[in-house]
Amino acid sequence: MKAITPARLPRMRQEGLIIDELPDEVLVYDLDRHKAHCLNQTAALVWRHCDGRTAPRVIAERLQSELDQPFSEDLVWLALRQLNKIYLLEESIGLPTQLAGMSRREMVRSMGIAAAVSVPLITSIISPTAVQASTCFPGGHACTTGVQCCSLQCLGNNTCHA
């Protein structure tokens, strides 16, 4: 793999995030981008090891020891690529040239079926703003109370005021 300079070693972002650690995954809410991310166990382990001082090769060695199973440096790079894409690293990092042009699917395919079990996976959703999350009925819609109506007025004929 292509070496990266110490100044460019991966470092997990911690500012502007709400982090909830669960037994087999980590939920991360990005306050700046209003996105929620679910990191599976593999992606979470890689992310936790991104301290700005540890090279991807060393992260792979540590995970292999922690998990007591083979863990390739390519899997670390796959996780770093995903973490970088969703802004969970302090600074953007470049992929090694042999991986830079590959899609996620191509990367997984090149690692083989044995690696598929431990593939780092991150699922993300955009969370709605408070206004988008609220629901109310427009004028003329049937209602039973004022709080159901956007106007907050349910008229005597059980329709929302326009």
Image (tube, grey):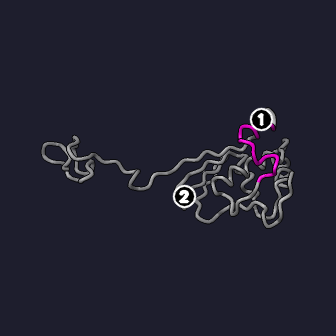
**Residue type of the residue flagged with mark 2:** Arg
Is residue 119 rendered to the left or right of residue 35?
A: right
Residue 76 position, x and y percent, is 78, 49
Is residue 119 rendered to the left or right of residue 18?
A: right
Q: Nearer the viewer, residue 100 or 82?
A: 100
Residue 12 position, x and y percent, is 70, 60
Q: Residue at x 76, y 48 (%)?
A: 100
Is residue 134 rendered to the left or right of residue 87?
A: left
Is residue 3 rendered to the left or right of residue 11?
A: right
Q: Is residue 107 magenta?
A: yes
Q: To which quarter of the image does residue 28 belong?
A: bottom right
User: In terms of sequence position, does the residue under pointer 1 or pointer 2 come before the other?
Assistant: 2
Q: Nearer the viewer, residue 96 or 137?
A: 96
Q: Residue at x 26, y 46 (%)?
A: 138
Local crowd at mark 2 within 10 Å, few (<14), some, or many (≥20)? few
Report the span colored magenta.
95-110
Q: Which residue is mark 1?
A: 109
CA gap between label 1 and label 2 equals 31 Å
Assign a secondary structure to mark 2: loop
Tell me if label 1 and label 2 are in contact, CB under 8 Å.
no
Q: Residue at x 86, y 51 (%)?
A: 1
**Residue type of the residue flagged with mark 1:** Arg
Q: Which residue is mark 2?
A: 33
